[in-house]
Amino acid sequence: MQNIKFGTDGWRAIIAQDFTCENVARVSYATAKWLLNRTPNPVVVIGHDCRFAGELFIETAIKVLTSMGVKVLTHKGFVSTPMVSLATVKLNANAGIVITASHNPPSYNGFKIKDGFGGPAAPAEITLVETHIPDSASIPSTSLQTLVENGMLSYIDMETLYENHVRESFDLTAIDKAVKLGYDAMYGAGQRILPRLLPSAIMLHAEYNPGFNGQAPEPLERNTKEFQQFIREKKSVSAGLITDGDADRIAMYDENGKFIDAHHILLLLIHYTVKYRQMNGKVVVAFSTSDKIKKICNHYNIPVEITKIGFKYIAEKMLVEDILVGGEESGGISVKGHIPERDGIWDGLLLLDLMRLTGKSMSALIQEVYDIVGAFVFERLDLHLTEEKKQEIIARCEAGSFNEFGDYKVERIETIDGYKYHLGHERWVMIRPSGTEPLLRVYGEARTTDEVNHLLETVRSILLS
């Protein structure tokens, strides 16, 4: 029996190794038990992204859920995570399920649970689901057609529902006319909806490829070099948008092919909503985000709170407080006026609307932000280590062994979720094991590219010594 535990965002495992129909059945059984303990006659929205065997795994989940009395609403073909979340809210379902491993390498798949409000189920709720996971669960042989005929399964068009919702909130014709967009779908679930919203967008990696051409669909600069070159060659492209495998994360490129990471996007969204839209509310960001977030919030006199890493902690806040922007270093961002869920395409449209509204280029808008908070560069190392080495490093962090990293003296340490070492002169480095992959992440921020690279290489050398 494989012990199944949910990580930072859902249960993820390697396909055919631990992510099997048998284990999907076990998690589906536990999800059904969790729902039935909360409400009679529950309804679930379920979808899958572009990953290998998504249809097979979703069929398994549907059969188990319906056999236990849970009615299921699904879509024919792949959908994005935000589409499932939105449908869960719009159709008053009790929960949403997405078969996706998000940004993980192609060998992975996963099982995300959304609560009825559309965002990630709270940690306490996920713990309850885990308590119901049995040693085994049978997969009924009932056909999906039979489930449709007896009313336990219905097909809905989540993509059109999502499109209609977007059209109610954006002047897409004006955006499409004002901004010539390049879009890298990374072979992910945003590939069909984006051209429906912005027909003139120039597309890249927007075809079905469940192996993602061997590349993890994570919107990082190192994973999107082809798109960067694509933008630099297409002189008419005024902005580049990237979303991950299930289209809930975002990154961008400016008109010159310069990468814009999630920290800069968060700053732009705060700048846009407060200065240009006269909106207000609190900003909530995860522990690994830039300290510049605090600086811009202080500039605009709006409150800011730091949470543990995982959007579920941000979503919890969005349910009970007036949250303007909530987001993570990984590119998962939610903005007031939408569902309490990450949505890469929605966030991209907000920034394109900012360009339309101001008539300014993306690089000019970044400069507006720098005029407030100062220029900075963020980078991240993903260290693939043995479990023994990883635990040794974490133990050294816990023991307070790091008072300096080479010439960088530690001025203070934060331990909200991982170990964040502040090194003076607006520099910091953070060490934390990934919650979704078997690796150790090392984050760093400094004023220039050379400085942050030198910092990270210094830290890497010390950690691996």
Image: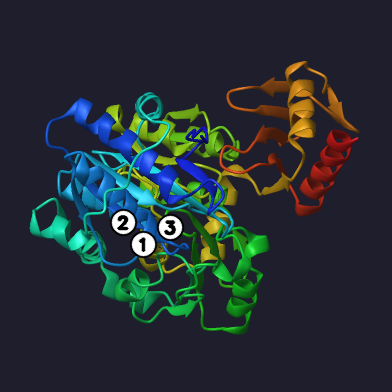
User: Which residue is disc 3 drawn over?
Assistant: 246
Q: Percent x, y for residue 300?
A: 44, 37
277 horizontally vs 245: left or right: left
Disc 2 and disc 3: Cα gap in Å? 19 Å
Disc 1 and disc 2: Cα gap in Å? 6 Å
Q: Nearer the viewer, residue 151 or 101?
A: 151
User: Which residue is disc 1 drawn over?
Assistant: 55
Q: Is the residue marked by circle 3 packed among few (<14), some (14-19), or many (20+) residues within 10 Å?
A: many
**Is residue 455 visible from the viewing direction of this image?**
yes
Disc 3 and disc 1: Cα gap in Å? 15 Å
Label 2 close to label 3 by CB (< 8 Å):
no
Residue depicted at x 56% and y 32%: 287
- Nearer to us of marks 3 and 1 is 1
Tag 3 secondary structure: loop
Q: Earlier in the sequence, mark 3 or mark 1?
A: 1
Q: Quadrant of the C terminus?
A: top right
